[in-house]
Amino acid sequence: MIATALRIAARDLRGGLRGFRVFLACLTLGVAAIAAVGSVRQAVQTGLAEEGAVILGGDAEMTFTFRMADDAEAAWMREVAEAVSETVDFRSMAVAEVAGETVRGLTQVRGIDARYPLYGSVGLDPAIPLDEALGTADRPGAVMHPTLIAQMGLEIGDTVRFGAQDFELRAALTHEPDMAGGNFGPGPRTLVRLDALDGAGLLAPGTLFNSQYRLALPRGTDLAALEAEAEARFAEAGMRWKDARNAAPSLGRFVERIGAFLVLVGLAGLAVGGVGISAAVRSYLTGKTETIATLKTLGAERRTLFTVYFLQIGAMTVIGLVLGLILGAILPLGLAPLIAGALPIPADFGVHPGPLLEAALYGALTALIFTLWPLARVEHVRAAALYREGSGLGHGWPRWPFLLTIAGLVAGLVGLSAWLSGVPRLALWSAAAIAAALVILSLAALLVRVAARRLARSRLVRGRSAVRLALGAIGAPGSEATSTILSLGLGLSVLAAVGQIDTNLRAAISQDLPEVAPAYFFVDIQPDQIGPFLDAMQTDPDVTRVESAPLLRGVITRINGQPAAEVAGEHWVIRGDRGLTYQAEAPPAREITAGTWWAEDYTGPPQMAFAAEEAQEIGIGLGDTVTVTVLGRQITATIAALREVDFSNAGIGFIMTLSPDALQGAPHTHIATVYAPAEVEGRILRTVAALGSNITAISVRDAIDQVSRALSGIAAATSWGAAATLLTGFMVLIGAAAAGERARAYEAAVLKTLGASRVRILSSFALRAALLGVAAGLVAVAAGGLAGWAVTHFVMETDFAFHLASALAIVAGGALATLLAGLAFALRPLAQRPAKTLRNGN
Amino acid sequence: MTDPILSLRDVSLSLDGNAGRIDILHGITLAVGAGETVGLVGPSGSGKSSLLMLLGGLERATGGAVRVLGQDLTALSEDALARFRRDNMGVVFQSFHLIPTMTALENVATPLELAGRRDAFDRAEEELAAMGLEGRMRHYPGQLSGGEQQRVALARAAAPRPRILLADEPTGNLDETNGRAIMDLLFDLRDRHGATLVMVTHAPDLAARCDRVIGLRDGRLDAARRDAAE
């Protein structure tokens, strides 16, 4: 049977591939987009894996917070490693005199030893040796990131002061080999020699700094075993371990997440393409009705007929997949220089089979899902179609085995995307959202058709023949309404949702926050400086509010005596070190959601107030114990109170507040927030600088700008994804318009025969296209607005406001797209002579 | 008459259209014997083609019984009907209904292939040669004249040696000369293979060549010719 079906299928394909152009375009585009995104993600991940040691700056890294390694730790490192490089990393203010004025710049300083970097090399401009650049012959040297040099208006040779120590700026730092290893800070980088910092007074006890030890290990070292040994020995002392197996976890996670997200957007594109694929197959099979009926008359069974067309469409699917994969593999290679330039790490661009296989699987499943439904209708074609017109594929539901298979394939596709994306929740939500959008759009299309049919018959449009014709065409059986609204609507919905989320988020950041956010954060205020600092701020008439708190940093190592990771899993609170404070007096009663605050003179065993929301997420509560490692010392405190902490207003907020007696003895600094109008910020900065050069100021406005820029990047990536979806939608639209060309030619011929002018016919065609576009746009705005509200309300937990401008742009875009596609395929029918068209029939 | 090869008892046919349900045939009872040639005549819309399609299992009766070669067609599934046609019937249409993407030879070979015949192409060549189309075997339908297309359709219907030939106005789309040639071939086929032939026609001279003529009017057997029905 297969052999016969194969022969008949091959013969039948001689009719050409014309009906498959939209099919191939949709499948190729969708598969190419997913393959390209996956290939770039793989290139970055391979780059991360292969260059792990360079990115990390060593085969392994041990980090300590607020302290250097003690003797035992240093001895162990020397024992296991062939070489050890010691660095410290901290925030500081660079101060310089430029043209008679004092300029300040926030920078992330790294003090390095002579062995740095163990792997890779530092890039300097001018290209002098690093030793020469940082040498201490006359006075110590420093190299700074070009951004900071430009920002402060410095020249090579200028003097820059950190704390109490002067440095000579000797070069611009153009490349830092281990920059991507998660060593980011709020300011641009400065490199100095570690021993040159001794006299600066910047690494005083309690100052916020990290010390990092990079290890060059013998070849063949078992990293996992070594990590386990280090963790066992030093984790309780607050040591954090990283090694070349996962050199840049944050970046790796980010690339994986954004890659997964874009693949999901690509799947939405494939879903839109699926609408086009389905329409193309339906249209192709409708054209084959006579052949199918003839074969039935000659004795072909349903199974044979299904196999004939399944094989044909299968062959087309393979062609579409291959084209998509070629395009998806070539595109990242072509754009490699551009993408590589934007990445902070070396990416390994090449043909990666994994992502291509993933894209092929998605493409094949999507093609199957969307072709099975029309294919199943082949068996609805009756042999009687040969002598009776109008018996096409019909509109009935396929038989249950087909429905079951389609449902199984959909479940397979969703399951596969949940598994392969690595973000199963997001994948499932996306699948639900796409399904919901398709259902909403289908219902909307039905509604539009019914409304158009009713309106076309109403008195309102009598005498307005162009409008009546347009409405009649939209409402008629076989109209383009459904495919237009489905194809364009889904792409526009994604774009509308992105637009609403983006504008709401920006509004939340740029409008709401500054009203309540402080102007500056000041950190590293020494205990003897906090008094004068508060006096200066409180007496300044322009300062509306000042808050301060003691600040220490610590790592949660145990919860109720169990290792923290076993209780809290991957929760962010236990990842890395967190700020913590101590406080005697109770906060306002409304902030305490459970338990009671300790007495102001409490001196018993350590007690703790934990942030209520995070406590609930981790699954801890009153009476539980939390062990925090602070400066190598372990403090176990019992949770006495749960406290509402608002992190959204950029004020001071701590996950953990301890009873004073537990921490007061530990070396620590203070953190302060100052609320003041923008115009006096400069003066406040100078006042604080006069109190001590070690105090670091962080402008909240600059930080917000940084966040806004990051958000813009994500919004842009999402918009590109939505644009790919829209492009597929536009293909489907063109396909629908092209498929309707013959019907429009017939309609134009009849109308011309009845005396309609070409302008009138064209305006009717244009009106119907624009009306459909507006309908698709309106539905998209409603669906996208709903999605935008859901994300804003439930995920970002901010207020949602509907933004009209973005919505109107979507509606106008929808109308324009359909108008262009509609008109492009209306001109030829209009130009044809009626006699020829009518002779050939419809 | 010997045992009828085709028999209809009180058959009716109604179809659902856009304008509602339309009754096409009412209470048709007739029988056709083996080897007989029957002409179905009547005005347009009288239900001739529908009756022929019922006999071929291409349409399903809404009432009554349709028996062909002793088999109740109303009890067969779509696939069983297809197999039944493949093994026992050849159908010729007014509009030829050749598959446009297949050559004349492939069109004729297709029913034989569907029946699993290994000699499908040899038989198809013989059949086309018998129709005088030796030089047209590799041509596509679009490259053939109307008369040639209908001869290919005849060859396709005859190739599996069916016991029943059904023809729906086989000369309706042809000029007089071609029409006569096709009819000669059709009757020749019937004579050569001894098949039963049921034919819808408007042409009185064609009807006159049949053993029996059955008339239809408004979906019922024409009273004037009722005596000829059984």
Image (cartoon, coloured by chain):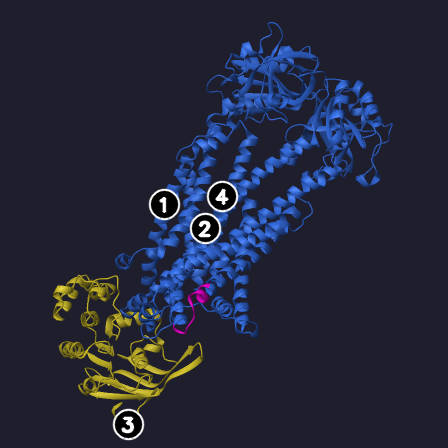
Chain colours: A blue, B yellow
Queried whether the magenta region covers residue A759, the answer comes back as yes
Q: CA distance from mark 3 to mark 2?
A: 65 Å
Amino acid marked by disc 4: Val
Q: Quadrant of residue B82?
A: bottom left
**What mark, if any, has residue A263 been given in the picture?**
4
Q: Element under label 4?
A: helix
Q: Which mark is nearer the camera, 1 or 2? A: 2
Amino acid marked by disc 1: Leu
Q: Which mark is nearer the camera, 3 or 2? A: 2
Q: Which mark is nearer the camera, 2 or 4? A: 2
Badge 2 or badge 4: first in the primary sequence? 4
Q: Residues within 10 Å of mark 1 (few under 14, many from 20)?
A: some
Which residue in the structure is indicated by mark 2? A728
Q: Do the residues marked 3 and 1 share a common chain?
A: no
Q: Do the residues marked 2 and 4 share a common chain?
A: yes
Q: Residues within 10 Å of mark 2 (few under 14, many from 20)?
A: many
In the rendered view of the protein, which quadrant contains the N terminus of chain A?
bottom left
Which residue in the structure is indicated by mark 3? B224
Q: Do the residues marked 3 and 2 share a common chain?
A: no
Q: CA distance from mark 1 to mark 2?
A: 15 Å
Q: Residue at (56%, 58%) from the top-left corner?
A: A779
Magenta stretch?
A: A753-762
Which residue in the structure is indicated by mark 1? A323
In the rendered view of the protein, which quadrant contains the C terminus of chain A?
bottom left
Say whether residue A576 is left or right of residue A540: left
Q: Residue at (46%, 69%) from the top-left corner?
A: A477
Q: Is residue A384 visible?
A: yes
